[in-house]
Image: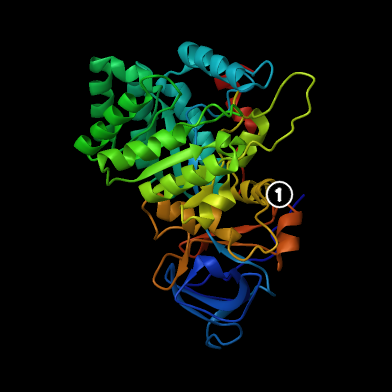
Amino acid sequence: MSYSFMSPPNAARFVLSNATVPAVTVAGFTGPSSEGLMRADIVVADGLIKDILPAGSAPAEFAKADMRDGMVWPTFADMHTHIDKGHIWERRANPDGSFMGALEAVRADREANWSADDVRKRMEFSLRSAYAHGTSLIRTHLDSLAPQHRISFEVFTAVREAWKDKITLQAVALFPLDAMADDAFFADLLMVIRDAGGMIGGVTQMNPDIDRQLDKLIRAAADNGLDIDLHVDETEDKQVLTLKAIAEAVLRNGFTGKVTAGHCCSLAQQDEDVAVATIDLVARAGISVVSLPMCNMYLQDRHAGHTPRWRGVTLLHELSAAGVPTAVASDNTRDPFYAYGDLDPVEVFREAVRILHLDHPLDTAARVITTSPSAIVGRPDIGCIAVGGPADLVLFSARRWSEFLSRPQSDRVVLRKGKVIDRSLPDYRELDTVIGA
């Protein structure tokens, strides 16, 4: 059995002394660092971060919890998830682990089972897991073909209200862009998104009408004051590169809202000149890119009897070097698109370091699950350690990167407004009545 490595004082004011913090997550404090890690004392008062001081210099009269160089992180931002389809694997597995198998399995399960009660129970289970792991912001895509768009957005709105003091929730409508040809459906979808304070998304696919579809989507977003978050080029097919078309459409339409592109897998299959030119367009268009390394690696280059030859992820280093805002996120959880996962950003970060080579050095790597996704989704106040901000922190016994990345950190301590939360994870047996086990 795992036990927490320390217990912060149960006091209105206390100090997390001799802490190690990822410098990229800290605002308003600088000090000597090694591979992006600094030592500091973090003063907590009345649920807020009152001060950040050099290690060992906090006022003696405050109660102290000696971190003994253990790490302190801000709570996490998970900016691309699918909590509407989470945890259906036992009910509707993907027969071959392929992308097309996942599409068909989800479609069948959605049409057969996604009542408001079913969606809410699975959403709540996911949020309880994410909260226990230390997440304070989640953006979820919601399958939005009729009639599911009305069911899921109504459930999401209720769940967002119920969880508003624990996790900030955002929602994106997910649908194939050719569904916009049905004017009545598209008008209704836009109304649902507006009423829910959501965003418009979609799946881009190469076809003769892609430019017209993108223009229509962008005009609708502009007319309705909506940001855009798209599923893009989730394929190994080198011939598919809608990311370029998206960037050109954003520039062509002069769109000033936020645009995010998820996946962008096929970018890594392009010849160098095509990749460089596309990345330049993405940077000029102000598009952000989120990589989903665990799901991308699971689905891409999967063929029966074939060992995968590539990692399935986008050109994150090259995009970042070009000034494109980048992040990583969980994506799917225990559903036909990804059979595993628990909405734990520490797992996502650990795997992203390995899959995307975010290491050597790791100086700024911590940003990909903290400050970068928070900034991309318009909440830079979340996912950082700053004086005056809430004492929403995650404490680890690990002192250095090798320690942090070599174990799952199951003994972490999560503070919300300076108070230790119950980190008990929900039991999968609670889903038995939902998935029919």
- Residue 196 versus residue 165 in the image, above or below: above
Q: Could you say which is closer to the camera, residue 314 or residue 183?
A: 314
Image location of residue 102, percent across then percent down: 59, 20
Image quadrant assignment for residue 212: top left
Q: Give the residue drawn at x 57%, y 48%.
A: 316
Image location of residue 276, percent across then percent down: 52, 46
Query: Where does label 1 land, which residue?
Result: 354
| Colour style of the rendered protein structure | rainbow
Q: Could you say which is closer to the camera, residue 11 or residue 28?
A: 28
Q: Could you say which is closer to the camera, residue 324 or residue 183?
A: 324
Image location of residue 112, percent across then percent down: 49, 11
**Residue 93 visible within the image:** yes
Q: Is residue 199 left or right of residue 44?
A: left
Q: Give the residue drawn at x 70%, y 64%.
A: 397
Badge 1, how many Cα within 10 Å: few under 14, some, many 20+? few
**Residue 422 visible within the image:** no
- Secondary structure at badge 1 equals helix
Q: Is residue 176 left or right of residue 330?
A: left
Image location of residue 34, percent across then percent down: 66, 74
Q: Give the residue drawn at x 75%, y 18%.
A: 304
Amino acid tagged 1 = Arg
Q: Could you say which is closer to the camera, residue 70 or residue 421?
A: 70
Residue sitting at the far front: 273
